[in-house]
Structure formats: structure tokens, C-alpha cells
Amino acid sequence: MDELTKTEPATIYIRPAKGLAALNLGDLWHFRELVLFMIWRDIKVRYKQTLLGALWAIIQPVMTMLVFNFLFNSVAKVSSDGIPYPIFSFTALLPWGLFTTALNTASRSLTSNHNMITKTYFPRLVLPLASVLGGLLDFGIAFLILIIMMFYYRITPSLTAIWAVPLFVLLSIIAALGVALWLSAINVQYRDVGYALPFITQFWLFITPVAYSSTVISGKWQLVYALNPMAGVVNGFRWALLGSGSGPNIFLAISTAISLVILFTGLIYFRNMERTFADTI
Amino acid sequence: MTIAIKVEGISKRYKIGTAPGKFRYGMLRDQIAAIPSKLFRRAEEKVGVNFIWALKDVSFDLEEGRVLGIIGRNGAGKSTLLKVLSRVTEPTMGMVTVRGRVGSLLEVGTGFHPELTGRENIYLNGAILGMKRNEIEAKFDEIVDFSEVEQFIDTPVKRYSSGMYLRLAFAVAAHLEPEILVVDEVLAVGDAEFQRKCLGKMNDVAAQGRTVLFVSHNMSAILRLTQEALVMQKGRLLLRAPTNEAVDFYLASGQSQAGERSWDADEIPAAAAPFRPLSLKLFDPRGAVADIVRSTEPLTVKIEYQLTAPITGLRVGIYLNTIRGEYVFTSFDVDEPALYEKYSVRQPGFYTSSCTIPGDLLNEGRYILGVNASSFGVKRYFMDENALGFSVDPSAAPGMQWAEQRQGPLRPRLNWAIDRSDA
């Protein structure tokens, strides 16, 4: 407090924002500790009063993998690019899980913390951002299972994995945050988001090469397919860890560009809606 | 003196739908369906949308280190003003210039998570209120000390009693050290002992030369803590005056005539439905509406109201307070078990609940009648703690042969007996 009283207090101007709100990310930086606290709180309470606790972070992707294995491998005999199907699908389920968990928690992050929004000031971006980043812990836990599976199937990833995996994790975070900003801001006014989301993620799963390989997409559709940000992420993961596919190409560039566009427009939309959050929530 | 807060022509408009209560959740469907008509119509012509000005052209300056009270009835715009000042919501028009960090105590315990321990919630809540981690660490022991929950500091707060919870929440907020502190009605919680402690803390804050804006319905707290107050009514700033003048002005306002109070539609919160208060009147024994009553005479209180739907377990009653904010008594129309049985469900219609306060009860002075309509433990439909002010005239009361002021709010005529024991 002493250094605060000594320094000249900052002057704040409160007035109606005109036109597009400035992104004002410096404000978010100022509240970075709150982001960490919110992540910590979400993680801390996530598996409270559950019997299995953090095991759920493993059970969910493993069970999905087993179901996929039965349906797509044993029954439908889908091609997995010569890679054992369980690890083929599990590698894709990791970023996919990160993405859907982020969407689920972040889209509700504003409405479930409505009393914070109506009572105190802080950059509202803190809430969806913390929700998205909070998913990294579950991702990390599930990743350990992937490492065990790689030992089991004797798959050695190339050295590119060291830089490629974090990069693709970042890319899925960007994709998730972009979509989450849109959904969370819309959800403040229209609770329809809560009903639409399960359907959206299910549909999204079908257009993402999680259960199948993207090689099944015929050439002329590849370009359309690349418009899905998660397609690039999932293919990138498989390439980095399992060596399948061709690695970064024009389709990845398109996926990444789309992610960045969604993130940027999401930020602008969020910032503009933010002004009325306290009034409409 | 430096100006800490400069408010220039602030207005805040809220949109309300045609049907009250239905405006909160916009339906995507309606918006989509409205697109064709929107294309052919100017934005101003929106049909079925009403606006309400929660704040209308409010301007004032506040110098650094001053404590300013804000008083006004429900819906006067006090809370909206504080929300604008603490940047929770944006004004529709006007500008505020704030010099320094604003800390808001709009509600204690914001962001408290029931699963987290007291210790964890202190850190979390501190961060939400804008404190830095090292600031919280430096204040941690002081906060715990103030809250009196040391023993339970590592227990999840869901196991706390509501009193402990409030104490901890207030302790965190009270140790926030912004240049400007905005406080809304936090003192309305907790037991008397804790309230005293909170008031003491507020005094300290003011004594440290920090700027404080303080909203309360508790006139004694306003009188004690502030030297100057704003009176607000329907979103406008009516008066800025020394606190005792402001409190007097406020209590006299809102009465359509002396001894009578009625409520406009915009003073009744939407949550009051199906209860609609109509009027509160005070009568002398001759049946005339009175603003000054005699201490020796009974006075009759009548509350008129309408129910638009049946209510189970409704009780309508009054609070009597002195002007200093001390309770004299609380009484409800169905306090009598037999009446409570009879009116266990009140059907829709117009009602009058009336009672008589006996003569030879109240001391001279000014009193405030409050109204409450609630179903115990279910819902509080309506409450106006400062509905009507009236004065008691002591002529012919016991002890008037001495020109002295009798202490206390009561002046009962007691049957004294004097016996000489040596005769």
C-alpha cells in the first residue's frame, strides 16, 4: 500500500464507449493474477465430491477410445493409416477433449459467475480464458496415458514432437478460445447456447478426423475440410506423435488462419458485448 | 483540495419489455423473427420496447478524503450510480473521472466458492477485488483476525455458519485499500456486534483520508459516518446537503400528503408481484390523516394493498424506527395465531391491514414507519423501511411538568404507587 499512496493515482475515465471497443488487452495483463486464481479455483473444485476424482480425466478419453475402437475398427474397419487403431484415435481424442471441455466450461463461465460480473469490475475476458486454460490439466493427465500407450505399441515419436506438440496444443487453445469467446458472450443474452452446444460439438466431431483418417476425404473436398480449425490440430497431433500424414501443409495454414480469424473476431465481439454484460446477464 | 470523483451528466438507460419480468432473457428466435421488420424500420421505432432511466443527468464532484452518503428510496438509482462508479456497468451518457483505484463493496463474498477453505477464499476474493497477491499476504493475518474465524480457516466455507461467512467476506473487503471506496448496504448484514465492528472499520477508512461513497437505508449509519449526503429520487439528484438536512428532506419526500404514503409503479420492484402496495396512512383518533400525533392518544396505521394472485402464509406488517435508525418494534397483521389460521391463504383482491398503536406509548420525537410484506422463510414480497415519517407531540404526556427531554423512544404512563413504609 505504501508504494501506492506515494505514486500518483491513475485517473480512470468512465464513459460510454463509442463504436468498436478497443481490445484493451493491457487491462487483462494487469489482472493476470486473477486468471491464475480462477484456473486454480476451477481445478481445485472440479472433482470435489466425486469418487474417482482426477481419474475422470483419464476415463473419459479412454472409454471413448474403446467405443471408437469397437465401432470403427472392429465393426466398420475404418483405415487408420497403418497405425494401431487405439493409439490412432486416442492421439486425436486428446486435443479434441481439450477443445470440447474448453467450449463446455467457457461458454458457461460468464453466466455461472454472474454475481462477480454484476458486483465487481475486472476484465470479463478473465473468465472464459481461465476456463479454457483450466482444461490443460486434464489434457496433461490424459497425455501420460498416451505416453504409456506409445511404449506399449513401441512407437517412437520423432524429435519434431518436442516443438510440434506444444505448438499444436497452443493451436487448439487458440481455436477453443476463439469459439468460446463467441459462445460465452452470446450465452449471456441467449441461453440457447446451452442447448445447442452438445449438438454442435457432436456435429463438429463428425467433421473432424478423430475417429477416422483425413485421407478418406477426397481431394476436392480437402480444401473445405481444412476450414475446420480442429482438423488441422488433430492431423498435426497425429503427424507430430505418430508420424502419420504429410505434416504442415497448406491445409494446416488454412486451419490456423481460420482459428486466428475466429479468435480475433471473437475478441472484438466479446469486448463489445462486455459493456452490457452486467445489465443483461 | 483535489477532486477524487467528478461526475458529469451521467445517465443510464435500461430497456424493459412491455410485459414486466419478461425482458431479461431475449430469445434468439424473436430476434431472428424481427430481422425482416427491422430492415424496414428505423431503430427508434421499436415497438413494445420501453426504456427506463435509472439515472438521469446526475452531476457532482467529490473531494479527496470526503465521506459522502447517498440516500433514496428503492429504485432511486443509488445502486446504479455506484455500479457506474465502480465500472460494473457503463453509463448511457455522460462521463465520470475517477482519480485512483476504486474498490467496491457492492456485495460481500463475491466469488466465494463454497468448496474452498476460508484461507483459499481470502486469496481468491482478494484477487477478484483487485488486490495483488503480496498485498493479500501482507494483510492475511489482519483479515483472519478481524473475521474471528481462525479455528476454521482451513475448513471449506460451505461448513461455515452464515455469520462466519459474512464476517470473513467483510473482512477481506474491508482490508482492501483503494483510494476510493464504494459501499452499498453491506452493513445491513450480520449481528449487532459485527455491525458495530464494521462501522468502526468504516470510520477508520474515512479517518485515513480515503474517499468513501456510502449507500444505506440505515439512517443512523448515514448520520454517524457521513457529514454530507446526496438525496436521489427516480434517477435524479435532488439535493446535496449536510447529512442531517438531507435525511430530514428524504424522510419528508415521497409523502403525497402529510401522514400518507403511496407507491408509484416504478417504486415497486417487479419481484413484489403478486403483492402491490397501495398506501400507508396514519390516522388520529378523530379519523383524520395525521402527520403529528399526540403521545397520549392512540394512532391507527392502515396499509392498503392489492393481491393479483393468491399468496400462502402472507404477513403484512410495520416496523417502527426512531429517526436515528433504532428499532422500536416490529409487528405483523397475522401475529395472532387465530388470524394466521384464518388467512393462511389470501385470495386475490384489495385488502386493508390496520392496527392501532395505543396512546401513552411513544415518546416525543420523530419516527419512521416501514412496511414489510412477506411469507416467512419463503419470500419477501415488498419492503420499504422508510415509508412514512411522523412526529409525536408530548403535550399532556406524563412528566410534562418538567421541561426536560426524556430519554428513550417510549413514554409509557405507568401506574406508580407510593407507599410510606414507616407509617
Image (cartoon, coloured by chain):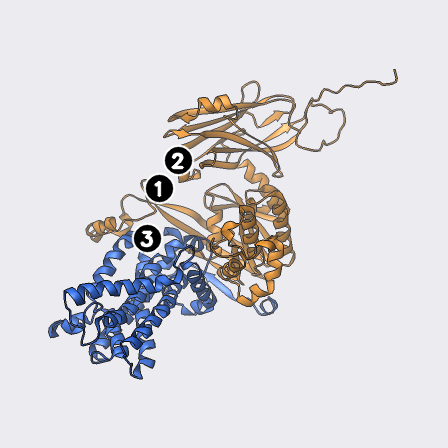
User: Is the same chain shared between marks 1 and 3?
Assistant: no
Task: Using the image, determine if residue B25 lies above or below residue A266.
Answer: above
From the top left corner, tell me how far across and down residue A209 is, in percent: 20, 69
Q: Is residue B58 visible?
A: no
Q: Which residue is mark 2?
A: B273
Query: Distance from label 1 to label 3 (Cα)?
Result: 15 Å
Chain where mark 1 sits = B
Q: Is residue A125 left or right of residue A200?
A: right
Q: Amino acid at mark 1?
A: Gly
Chain where mark 3 sits = A
Q: Amino acid at mark 3?
A: Gln
Residue A104 falls in which quadrant of the image?
Answer: bottom left
Query: Distance from label 1 to label 2 (Cα)?
Result: 10 Å
The colour assigned to chain A within the rendered structure: blue
Q: Is residue B19 left or right of residue B268?
A: left
Q: Can you name the residue that lies furthest to the right here?
A: B422
From the top left corner, tell me how far across and down residue A101 is, in percent: 32, 62
Residue A78 falls in which quadrant of the image?
Answer: bottom left
From the top left corner, tell me how far across and down residue B36 is, in percent: 19, 51
User: Is the same chain shared between marks 1 and 2?
Assistant: yes
Mark number displayed over residue B21: 1
Q: Which residue is mark 3?
A: A189
Q: Nearer the viewer, residue B373 or B233?
A: B373
Query: Quick one: quadrant of the N terminus of chain A?
Result: bottom right
Q: Would you say the residues marked 1 and 2 are in contact, meaning their CB atoms lie under 8 Å apart?
A: yes
At horizontal 44% and vertical 48% (from top left) the residue drawn is B56
Q: Amino acid at mark 2?
A: Ala
Question: Which element is circle 3 on?
Answer: helix
Q: Residues within 10 Å of mark 2 (few under 14, many from 20)?
A: some
